[in-house]
Image (cartoon, rainbow, N blue to C red):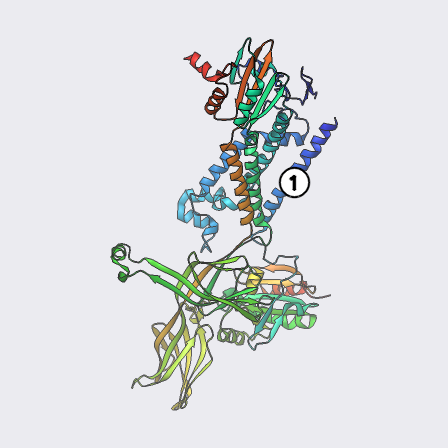
């Protein structure tokens, strides 16, 4: 009888070890594609980028504020539609602790400057020339918006074109209490 | 489940076919046969005896060699099917969704192929599960056979049951023989046998370690599989791709911005006729034959930095990356694997008087970083009002379709002493648009091109583990192939004797060896009962 018990325990341990290894491999395989992508609920990857004048913007400096992180390009049609909404809502929410950082995907200064002038944009526009921030956030395609709360946690990720109403709701969502 | 006690007194585990000690036949079925199945020494393969709990059932399922073989065959078929069409992971960035790509390029077959998941065979969960099942089968099959076999061989006695001996393939007996055990022992020892003599019984054995060959082999395989599994452990395996333009300095992907690379020049050389007669023929036939793909780079190390941040770089070395000559650093290897030629880097225009053709100087616009103003002196200058890297007209308004300089267009303002307010001109490739009739124009002079180099970045720390697994695999293979486990039994009984022999392979050689050992003794030479049986049939 004792032998039988010993056998059962031994077999259970071996099978457990083997299945643990299999589960590990399967899990890793499933999560390998989005390993680097910033996921909702995770801390937003920190970054440092410069604007047109060379001023540095660091995400971690925005703790305590909600951050509306928008990736855009002048050639992206939906981005053009969204920009005025973002500007309007920015005017309302910047006093309530919500900031916009608009990350250009690495275009020329002339193109960005003309675009900002055309749409009268006042929020900070930074340039991700090396594409490193886009990679850290797994951006493809544009437009892409991350909502980051005052604790630096990603609350939502939006890939679709936003209406002004949506922009307003999203800003409400990350407004610090 | 009761233990089985043999008449010799040895207690065997349940399910034993041949007594571990004396070889007596404990199983009715085996007793009826003329020869014994000696594969696992008639030991009790546990899998075939207990089937009580769910754990036992799972265990027994994987313990079956039949199941193992079926798993291997299924994996083989899946692997073969996966090689019919290109895998999605090798296609790079597709212009359309993958399912559409397969259907467009391979028709209904492509559609089915995608539907059943073969577009990503080797990375799919079911393929991994198959490989993992083979691993489980290997572990359990080996455990279930190696341990009982080890016990049976350890417990074997010199004196064997007659029923065991006369059912061996090599067997003979004789009445009234005197055996000189001392000289026989000497002879056997000369052939490297370990000889045990016990009260008129003899066991000569050699090469037992050959029996462990398959299990050593399996251990190698399991280590090999563990090596493959390590790919998923962070830091063990990195496979990235880097597109880098000439003149660009970028972080090497996968290194967490620890290493940077500058591409100074990409070189693409082809063979020409000066390389010899052989090449002339080949060039005529094929058009162009590549001779060299090379990227001249400088490698830097960097302090830790955040994405987007530009760290201080410290030069490590210059290097020429060529095909099969990767740049290696700290386990990482950068391979030359692709290229893209001739992207426009800069364009040169001349401010020209349309009528006289007189030029007032050239401006060169760097398309990555165009300036706003270009001063030509003497009151002449050009302002760049707008720049469209990939120009298109949309709803009557100029815009850009992407940020790549595929079809550059510029909005200029030309300032001259006689036109201090400036004239506006819009210049795209092969066309100039003017709002009003201008006196001056921007005349295109030249364009400079840059090339991209595509480098694969790879880190593989699993290779040593895989190599060790492979070496152990080969050791096991050699062990089982080049050595044989040979045993000779002699039993004296009532003035006569029985002699039997067993080997796990090469019966012919074994038979000859026994013949030679027994040549000038009075012991009968064993007869091969298997070939004898065949002869009878004929």
Near-viewer residue (A55 or B180): B180
- Residue at 56% x, 12% y is B178
Q: Quadrant of the C terminus of chain B?
A: top left
Which residue of the protein is positioned furthest toward the right in this rendering? A2
Side of A153 relative to B427 (left or right): right
The crowding category of the residue bearing disc 1, from other C-alpha atoms within 10 Å (few below 14, some 14 to 19, many at least 20), is: few
Label 1 is found on which chain of the structure?
A: A
In the rendered view, would you say B79 is above or below B104?
A: above
Near-viewer residue (B389 or B85): B85
Q: Position of residue B203 (x, y in %)?
A: 59, 21
Q: Is mark 1 on a helix, strand or loop?
A: helix
Viewer can see residue B16: no
Q: Mark 1 points at which residue?
A: A17
In the rendered image, which quarter is residue A152 located in?
A: bottom right
In the rendered image, which quarter is residue B446 located in?
A: bottom left
Count how many numbered circles sit on residues in the image. 1
Q: Position of residue A172 (x, y in %)?
A: 67, 64
- Residue at 48% x, 15% y is B527
In the rendered view, would you say B90 is above or below B345?
A: above
């Amino acid at each position: 009888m004792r032998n039988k018990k010993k056998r059962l325990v031994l077999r259970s341990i071996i099978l457990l070890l083997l299945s643990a290894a299999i589960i590990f491999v399967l899990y890793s395989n499933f999560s390998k594609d989005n390993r680097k992508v910033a996921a909702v609920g995770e801390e937003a990857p920190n970054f440092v980028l410069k604007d047109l004048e060379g001023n540095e913007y660091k995400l971690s400096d925005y703790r305590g504020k909600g951050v509306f992180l928008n990736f855009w390009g002048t050639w992206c049609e939906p981005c053009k539609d969204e920009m005025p909404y973002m500007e309007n809502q920015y005017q309302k929410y910047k006093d309530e602790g919500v900031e916009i950082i608009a990350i250009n995907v690495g275009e020329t200064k002339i193109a960005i400057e003309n675009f900002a002038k055309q749409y009268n944009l006042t929020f900070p526009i930074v340039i991700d020339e090396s594409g490193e921030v886009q990679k850290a956030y797994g951006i493809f395609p544009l437009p892409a918006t991350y909502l980051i709360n005052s604790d630096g946690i990603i609350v939502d990720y939006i890939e679709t074109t936003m209406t002004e109403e949506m922009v307003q709701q999203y800003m409400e969502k990350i407004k610090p209490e | 489940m009761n233990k089985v006690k043999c008449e010799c007194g040895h207690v065997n585990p349940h399910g034993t076919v041949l007594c571990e000690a004396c070889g007596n036949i404990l199983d009715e079925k085996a007793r009826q046969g003329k020869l014994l199945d000696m594969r696992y020494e008639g030991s009790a393969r546990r899998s075939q005896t207990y089937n009580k709990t769910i754990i036992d059932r799972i265990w027994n399922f994987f313990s079956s060699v039949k199941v193992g073989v079926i798993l291997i065959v299924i994996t083989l078929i899946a692997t073969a099917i996966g090689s019919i069409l290109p895998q999605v992971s090798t296609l790079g960035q597709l212009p359309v969704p993958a399912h559409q790509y397969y259907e467009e390029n391979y028709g209904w077959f492509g559609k089915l192929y995608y539907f059943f998941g073969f577009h990503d065979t080797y990375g799919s969960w079911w393929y991994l599960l198959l490989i993992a099942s083979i691993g489980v089968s290997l572990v359990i099959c080996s455990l279930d056979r190696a341990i009982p076999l080890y016990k049976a061989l350890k417990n074997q006695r010199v004196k064997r049951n007659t029923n065991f001996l006369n059912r061996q393939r090599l067997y003979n007996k004789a009445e009234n023989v005197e055996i000189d055990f001392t000289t026989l022992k000497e002879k056997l020892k000369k052939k490297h046998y370990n000889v045990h003599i016990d009260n008129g019984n003899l066991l000569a054995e050699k090469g037992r370690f050959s029996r462990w060959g398959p299990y050593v082999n399996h251990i190698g395989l399991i280590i090999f599989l563990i090596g493959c599994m390590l790919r998923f452990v962070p830091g063990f395996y990195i496979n990235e791709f880097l597109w880098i333009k000439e003149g660009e300095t970028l972080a090497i992907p996968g290194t967490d911005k620890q290493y940077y690379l500058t591409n100074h020049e990409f070189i693409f050389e082809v063979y020409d006729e000066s390389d010899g007669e052989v090449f002339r023929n080949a060039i005529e036939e094929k058009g162009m034959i590549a001779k060299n793909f090379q990227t001249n780079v400088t490698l830097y190390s960097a302090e830790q930095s955040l994405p987007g941040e530009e760290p201080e770089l410290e030069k490590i070395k210059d290097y020429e990356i060529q095909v099969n000559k990767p740049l290696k650093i700290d386990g990482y290897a950068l391979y030359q694997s692709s290229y893209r030629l001739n992207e426009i880097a800069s364009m040169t225009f001349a401010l020209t008087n349309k009528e006289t053709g007189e030029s007032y100087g050239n401006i060169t616009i760097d398309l990555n970083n165009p300036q706003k103003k270009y001063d030509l002196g003497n009151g002449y200058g050009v302002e760049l009002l707008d720049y469209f890297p990939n120009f298109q007209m949309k709803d009557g308004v100029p815009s850009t379709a992407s940020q790549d300089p595929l079809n550059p267009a510029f909005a200029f303002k030309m300032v001259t002493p006689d036109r201090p307010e400036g004239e506006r001109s819009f210049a795209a490739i092969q066309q100039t648009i003017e709002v009003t009739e201008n006196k001056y124009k921007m005349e295109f002079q030249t364009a400079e091109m840059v090339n991209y180099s595509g480098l694969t970045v790879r880190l593989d720390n699993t290779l040593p583990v895989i190599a060790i697994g492979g070496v152990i695999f080969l050791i096991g293979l050699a062990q089982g192939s080049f050595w044989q486990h040979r045993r000779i039994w002699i039993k004296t009984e009532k003035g006569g004797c029985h002699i039997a022999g067993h080997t796990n392979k090469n019966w012919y050689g074994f038979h000859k060896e026994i013949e030679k050992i027994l040549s000038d003794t009075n012991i009968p030479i064993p007869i091969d009962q298997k070939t004898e049986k065949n002869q009878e049939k004929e």
